[in-house]
Amino acid sequence: MNTKTELWKYFKIIRTKTKLYLEPLSFLRGDLILFHPIRSSQNEIVFRASGNSIEIQNMREKMFQKVNAHDAIIRYNYSGFDVIASDSEYLFLEYDKLIDNCIYYEVVKESESTLMKYDLALNNNCVVSVNQKQSIALSSEKDLYIYNDTVFQRISDGKIFSIDAIMQAFQKLNVPLIDEIDPFPSMCFFHDHWLEIEISDFRFFLIHLDTMHPYYFEGIIDVEGNYVYRYE
C-alpha cells in the first residue's frame, strides 16, 4: 500500500442515532504511518497523524499545506485547521485520551513529561498539575489516572481513592491471599470503573470504584465497563 498518495482508506466517521457513515478524507495526504481519529462529527474531525510528511488541504484556498511535524494532533473543519500539539527535534508526544470534551496528551522533552489538556469547547491548551511524586496511568478503556503511593485520582470525574480504604475493603473478603498483595501500584491495572490487582497466575482482587465493593476471582477474567467476565 503506497502511503505517499491520497488513500480511500482514510475516512471520517459520522455517527447518527441509527447509522454510521464513513467518508473519504480527501483533505489529508502524505507519507503517513498512522491515522488515529480522536473525535468526529458532521462539522469537524480531530485526529492524530504521524509520518515523514503530513499535508492538509485548506478548503478556502483549495491548496495543501504542509504540517511542520512528524507527529501531530490536528483539529480540522471546512474553515481550516489547527494543530493542537506536535512533535519537534527535542519533543515527542505520548498517548492521547478523549475524556468528556477534552483531549489529554503527554508531551516528553529531555526525559521530562508534561500532561496537557486541550478543551475542545474553549479551544485552548493548558498544563495539568502533576507533581514530581505523582505518576500517570492509563485506563485499559478511556480514562486516565494520577497516583502516588497513598491515593489515586480518576481524571474524568476528579474522584480520589485511598489505597488504605481499598485494602480495608479487601480485608473484609477474608481471603488469606490478602497478605500477598504487593505494595501499590505493583501488579495493579486501572480500568474506567475498576482497580484490578493480580496476586498470582489467575488470582485477582478487584474493587468497583463507583461502589467500593470488593471482589476476589480465580481463573481467566476480562474487565469491560461496569462488568467483570469470568471464563471457565
Image (cartoon, rainbow, N blue to C red):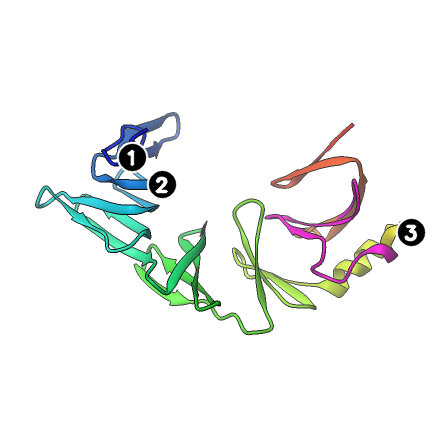
Residue carrying label 2: 33
Q: Position of residue 227 (x, y in %)?
A: 66, 38
Residue 161, quarter of the rendered image: bottom right
The CA span between labels 2 and 3 is 49 Å
Mark 2 vs 1: CB contact within 8 A: yes
Distance, label 2 to label 1, CA atoms, is: 7 Å
Residue labelled with disc 3 = 176
Q: Residue at x 44, y 69 (%)?
A: 110
**In the picture provided, is 88 more to the left or to the right than 55?**
right
Residue 45 magenta: no
Q: Is residue 97 above or below residue 163?
A: above
Q: Secondary structure at mark 2?
A: strand
Q: Tell me residue 183's x, y (percent).
A: 76, 62
- Residue most extreme to the bottom: 132
Quarter that holds the N terminus: top left
> Which part of the image, by quadrant, shows the C terminus?
top right
Could you tell me which residue is drawn at 40 percent across and 52 percent down? 101
Q: Amino acid at mark 2?
A: Ile
Q: Residues within 10 Å of mark 2 (few under 14, many from 20)?
A: some
The quarter of the displayed image where residue 38 is located = top left
Report if the CB atoms under discs 3 and 1 are less than 8 Å apart: no
Label 2 vs 1, first from the N-terminus: 1
Kindly give the residue lying farthest to the top in the view shown: 19
CA neighbours of label 1 inside 10 A, class few (<14), some (14 to 19), many (20+): few
Q: Amino acid at mark 1?
A: Thr
Residue at the disc numbered 1: 3
The boundaries of the magenta stretch are 179-205
Could you tell me the amino acid type at mark 3? Pro
Residue 27, how many percent across, how many down? 20, 39
